[in-house]
Image (cartoon, helix red, strand yellow):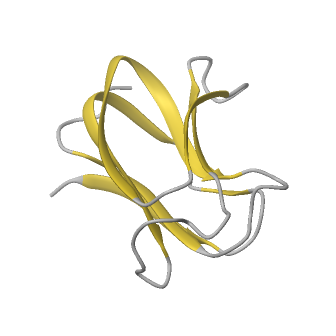
């Protein structure tokens, strides 16, 4: 069973609980109403922390529905959500990771 973290974002500045990842993982981004294509004006951002969650840097951004594969060669914390000023419509965001998490 894959380890996963997900949430439906219903306002700006909402993020998933940070998850520690190493190796391959998937990022899922879709509209909460299951429509495909545009996120209706919402921009979703993935952030990464290599200092235990003290600070996060943007890794990627989406304005359309997507299912992508990522790879992390070092253990890092990841979170996905919507920044202040970038919310327009509700979206579902999440990570899935198959394997063991190192601590």
Please identify the quarter of the rendering in which residue 51 is found.
top right
Please identify the quarter of the rendering in which residue 47 is found.
top right
- Picture coordinates of residue 75 (x, y %)? 40, 20
Which quadrant: the C terminus? top left
- Which residue is located at x 50 percent, y 79 percent? 32
Q: Is residue 40 left or right of residue 103?
A: right
In the image, farthest residue toward the right: 85
- Picture coordinates of residue 20 (x, y %)? 43, 35
Q: How many marks?
A: 0
In the image, farthest residue toward the bottom: 33
- Which residue is located at x 55 percent, y 70 percent? 91
Q: Is residue 28 left or right of residue 83?
A: left
Which quadrant: the N terminus? bottom left
Q: Is residue 25 above or below residue 22?
A: below
Q: Is residue 75 above or below residue 27?
A: above
Q: Is residue 54 above or below residue 45?
A: above
Which of the two residues, 89 or 70, is positioned nearer the viewer here? 89
Q: Is residue 83 left or right of residue 85?
A: left
- Which residue is located at x 56 percent, y 66 percent? 39
Q: Is residue 23 above or below residue 18?
A: above
- Picture coordinates of residue 40 (x, y %)? 62, 70
């Amino acid at each position: 069973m894959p380890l996963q973290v997900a949430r439906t974002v219903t306002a700006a500045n909402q993020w998933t609980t940070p998850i520690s990842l190493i190796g391959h993982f998937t990022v899922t981004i879709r509209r909460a109403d299951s429509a495909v294509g545009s996120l209706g004006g919402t921009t979703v951002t993935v952030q990464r922390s290599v200092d235990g969650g003290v600070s996060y840097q943007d890794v990627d951004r989406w304005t359309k529905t997507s299912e992508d594969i990522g790879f992390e060669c070092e253990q890092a914390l990841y979170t996905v959500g919507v920044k202040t000023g970038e919310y327009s419509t509700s979206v579902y965001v999440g990570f899935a990771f198959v394997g063991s998490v190192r601590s």
